[in-house]
Image (cartoon, rainbow, N blue to C red):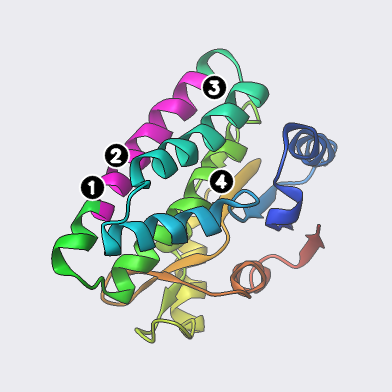
Amino acid sequence: MLIYKFKGAVMQNPEMIAGIRNEIQKQSENCIVVVSALKGVMPRLRALYALSLKKGSGFEEEFKEFRHVHADLAEHLLAGNKLSEYLEDMQKHLDELYEILHQVAPVKEASQAMKDYILAKGDILSSLLFSKLFENASWKDSRDFIITDSNFGAPEILWEESCEAVSREFRDTGGITVVPGYCGKTKSGYSISLGRVGLSLTAALLESAFQKVKVA
């Protein structure tokens, strides 16, 4: 199994993303592709969080722009059923995001768990988009196999439990699989951000089972 990981710096425009796709398509081995949010998306999510917390003006415009970034890129890279499938998935996640962002202001102060759930949408939307670039690629949610403690802000991956979850999740997986790179889930079931080194941690966890890693 070959494992790729791609940072936001290379997830920024149709040409670069198409180049990554072409590189992966040359491989004959099964592979897992770990990706970050699109370049510039995480600051937008943090801005949306801050605007919701303070009931700041400009929220609706910022949310529309957040949607546009993903929809516009999808329309450049996808067509037909793949585009329709992605736009449907995207809208579902955007509806969830919009709803939870509107739960932030009434409670005056959002929990770290709520903030991490919001931030996870960046990786989820980009990895879903990336999975649609291939004819038969599958998508898996890293929160289904990365299990951490509840130390929000500096979580520790529960390595043994997570490796067992990887074995279960990927037991019958072949071809190309795409996963988000920076999010996991606590033992209590809350989404949690893995922080700046999340991409490397996710790849390292997968490397425990699959030995070849290619970094981009």
Q: Position of residue 67 (x, y in %)?
A: 46, 36
Q: CA distance from mark 1 to mark 2?
A: 6 Å
Left or right: 64, with 211 as reference point:
left
**Is the residue under label 4 in contact with that under label 3 (CB below 8 Å)?**
no
Q: Position of residue 86 (x, y in %)?
A: 48, 29
Q: CA distance from mark 3 to mark 1?
A: 26 Å
Say which residue label 1 marks: 99
- Which stretch appears magenta? 83-101
Q: CA distance from mark 3 to mark 4?
A: 14 Å
- In terms of depth relative to the viewer, which is nearer, 189 or 62? 62
In the rendered image, the vertical position of residue 132 relative to residue 151, given as above or below: above
Magenta span main SS: helix
Q: Amino acid at mark 4?
A: Ser
Q: CA distance from mark 2 to mark 3?
A: 20 Å
Mark 4 falls on what kind of element? helix
Q: Amino acid at mark 2?
A: Asp
Q: Closer to the N terminus: mark 3 or mark 1?
A: 3
- In the rendered image, which quarter contains the N terminus? bottom right
